[in-house]
């Protein structure tokens, strides 16, 4: 593809991702109640217990992508810089241990201990979410990998919803630092836009749909739907 064609293709995938989020995730019962201030405490606690493993494992999975596609990144040092910075931020912002280390602070504000999060036996929807996204880092072709992870932008919107809503549940600004950092990072062009930048160069080099049943548009859409399925599962399984 030419650079212009690659950009148009990536933008079309981004549109599918955003449309799916606004149609299926944003208006879902979990987020409708969250924004209204009526989401039950057991649902909030069920959410964070099941989210912790995702937050930790998807980041450790992402750390392997540098090695998996190191040949590609060696040929594109500007993208190598961006993926290295992105991985580094996940594990060092705001301090050593990175984003996931902020979840026990939030959990404590919601009445959930760190041990409860660490030892949580995940609901099926959470297990599916973790395994889908970890595998999408370690075991799929290059273009499909970054088409899936273009969904990262919607975590910025989700983080904004949590950050604006949790004060209604008595959660302080300090306890919500996890969401502030994610909103800033995932909606930032340098961090959140890295996945699309990598995909565009991959498309220019001829990478594309390599597996039956996994067109790139589907990769973006199913990633958002897996997130929606997780939140629907939390809402359904906790009172």
Image (spheres, helix red, strand yellow):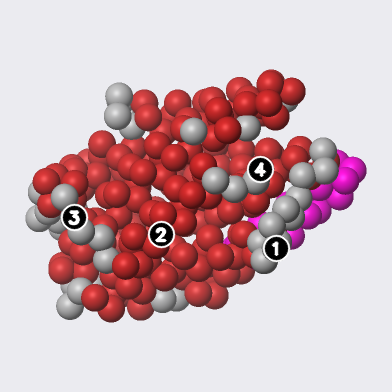
Q: Classify 155 as above or below 192.
A: below
* Residue at left offset 56%, top offset 65%: 222
Q: Main secondary structure of the magenta part?
A: helix
Which badge, 3 or 1, is on the more N-terminal residue?
3
* Residue at left offset 62%, top offset 59%: 219
Image quadrant occupied by the C terminus: bottom left
Find disc 2 in the rendering and name its residue.
129
Find disc 3 in the rendering and name its residue.
120
Q: How many marks?
A: 4
Find disc 4 in the rendering and name its residue.
142
Question: Which span is picked out in magenta?
Answer: 1-18
Which badge, 3 or 4, is on the more N-terminal residue?
3
Which badge, 4 or 1, is on the more N-terminal residue?
4
Q: How far is the residue under mark 3 from the one under mark 1?
A: 35 Å
Task: Determine contact: label 4, label 2, CB under 8 Å.
Answer: no
At mark 4, the secondary structure is: helix
Which badge, 1 or 2, is on the more N-terminal residue?
2
- Disc 4 or disc 1, which is closer to the eye? 1
Q: Classify 145 as above or below 101.
A: below
* Residue at left offset 53%, top offset 60%: 223
Q: Nearer the viewer, residue 44 or 160?
A: 44
Find disc 1 in the rendering and name its residue.
212
Task: Determine contact: label 1, label 2, CB under 8 Å.
Answer: no
Q: How far is the residue under mark 3 from the one under mark 4?
A: 32 Å
């Amino acid at each position: 593809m030419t650079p212009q064609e690659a950009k148009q293709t990536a933008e079309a995938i981004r549109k599918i991702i955003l449309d799916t989020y606004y149609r299926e995730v944003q208006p879902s019962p979990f987020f409708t109640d969250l924004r209204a201030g009526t989401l039950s405490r057991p649902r909030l606690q069920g959410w964070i217990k099941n989210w912790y493993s995702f937050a930790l494992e998807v980041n450790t999975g992402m750390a392997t992508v540098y090695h998996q596609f190191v040949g590609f990144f060696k040929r594109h040092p500007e993208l190598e810089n961006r993926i290295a910075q992105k991985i580094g931020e996940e594990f060092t912002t705001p301090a050593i241990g990175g984003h996931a280390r902020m979840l026990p602070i939030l959990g404590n504000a919601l009445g959930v201990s760190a041990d409860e999060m660490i030892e949580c036996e995940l609901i099926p929807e959470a297990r599916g979410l973790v395994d889908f996204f970890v595998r999408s880092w370690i075991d799929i072709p290059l273009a499909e990998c970054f088409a899936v992870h273009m969904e990262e932008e919607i975590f910025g919107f989700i983080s904004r919803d949590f950050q604006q809503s949790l004060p209604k549940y008595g959660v302080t600004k300090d306890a919500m630092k996890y969401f502030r950092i994610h909103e800033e990072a995932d909606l930032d062009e340098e961090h959140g836009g890295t996945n699309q930048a990598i995909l565009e160069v991959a498309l220019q080099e001829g990478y594309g749909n390599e597996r039956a049943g996994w067109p790139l548009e589907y990769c973006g859409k199913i990633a958002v739907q897996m997130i929606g399925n997780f939140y629907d599962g939390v809402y359904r399984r906790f009172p």
